[in-house]
Image (tube, helix red, strand yellow):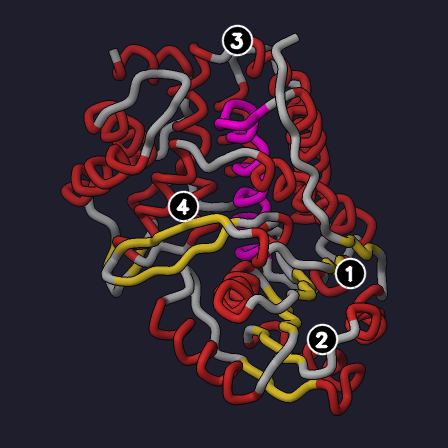
Amino acid sequence: MDPFVFNQLASRMVFGAGAVRQVGVECAGLGVTRVMLVHDASATAPADDIAVQLGPTMVLRWHEVAQHVPVALADRARDAATAAGIDAVVCVGGGSSTGLAKAIALSHRVPIIAVPTTYAGSEQTTIYGLTGGRHKQTGRDAAVLPRVVVYDPELTVGLPPTVTGPSSFNALAHSVEALWAPGCNPVTTAIALEGVRAIHASLPTVMAHPSDVDARGRLLVGAALSGMALGATSAGLHHKICHVLGGMFDLVHADAHSVVLPHVLAFNAPALPAEMAGLAAALGVPVGEEAAALWDLAVASEVPTRLADLAGSGRSLQRDDLRAVAEAAAGEVTTNPRPVDTAAILGVLERAFDGHRPTVTTAARSAS
């Protein structure tokens, strides 16, 4: 076995139906006294409950969030945090709320207590992102890893299918790419494959029976494992493409994941025989059908499967836009299992734009 290093991140996880009622206790355990509560509009109700738990220790409540964390928004929130003299951030909601909390923790070096209401998984990573000038800049800093993550599957019961499905694919992408991303090792692979199993097994049940709390709990576990896998490895070709699409065209991050992932997987699969054998087993499909299985899951979950159907910045993405995306992504990718350049990425994007069921043979032939 090849030598490897695995850094286990220090974060406390509190999981269970009704766990949101423990947020105040968790804050007290950290000894914080001046809390900033960040939440998105969909998380107003649980945020109200948390505000009651916090009582006078909540000195600032912030509900302006946006995907990809625009720099201007982060600056406003940071200024408000400074004025309030905060010593902690509690964030409630999806990846955008977590992302803003990370931006504040990055500048103010205060702990985060995260309460996810979607399946983004970003609460398990040291990765942050800020967007300005149509470019999304990401980085890593231990300060942005939440000290406590409270997972309450009951908070996800009202999540619309149009959010549940893409959000789950966001998490799924973390696990799939972690199988070959820089930093991968036997520990991260075990975590990633279990994340794939949990998401693949529970997502169809959640989509068919949205009120099934047990299935949503399993999906949350899968999302957490996927976030851990990403946090212990690095973002590769798939994530770089999605970040460029988000930064340049303000596409919904989770939607981009569900569209792009099967096609990046089909492109890289020929160079990853051992990894694909493990992924095929986790998905319960024959070797060689991994990319198609993810596409089938996307169709069954009624999530986006064509870039042509996505819109951002007030307009739909056009085929003529793809070359600029490919050029930008090529400049971001430093390592990949197969040689990659602008032409190769353009081929992936064109197949994702058309949205046909991917095959490894087609991806390999068009990239050669």
Q: Is residue 175 above or below residue 187?
A: below
Relative image position of residue 122 (x, y in whole percent): 57, 51
Q: What's the residue type where badge 2 is placed?
A: Pro
For disc 1, the marked residue is 152
Q: What's the residue type where badge 3 is placed?
A: Pro
Label 2 vs label 3: CA separation?
45 Å
Q: Is residue 25 above or below residue 183?
A: below
Label 1 vs label 4: CA separation?
26 Å
Q: Answer with mark 1 or mark 4, whichever residue precedes in sequence.
A: 1
Q: Pick whichever, 113 or 44, lies toward us.
A: 113
Residues rendered magenta in the picture: 161-184
Relative image position of residue 304 (x, y in whole percent): 44, 45
Q: What's the residue type where badge 4 is placed?
A: Ala
Q: Answer with mark 2 or mark 3, whichever residue precedes in sequence.
A: 2
State the residue at coordinates (64%, 31%).
192
Residue 300 appears in the rendering: no
Q: What's the residue type where badge 1 is placed?
A: Asp
Relative image position of residue 300 (x, y in whole percent): 57, 38
For disc 4, the marked residue is 256
Q: Nearer the viewer, mark 3 or mark 4?
A: 3
Q: Pick whichever, 159 or 31, lies toward us.
A: 31
Please say whether residue 163 is one of the residues in the magenta stretch: yes
Left or right placement of residue 175 versus residue 361 in this view:
right
State the residue at coordinates (42%, 33%).
236
- Give the residue at the far left of this rendering: 320
Q: Which mark is residue 273?
A: 3
Secondary structure, mark 1, is loop
For disc 2, the marked residue is 46
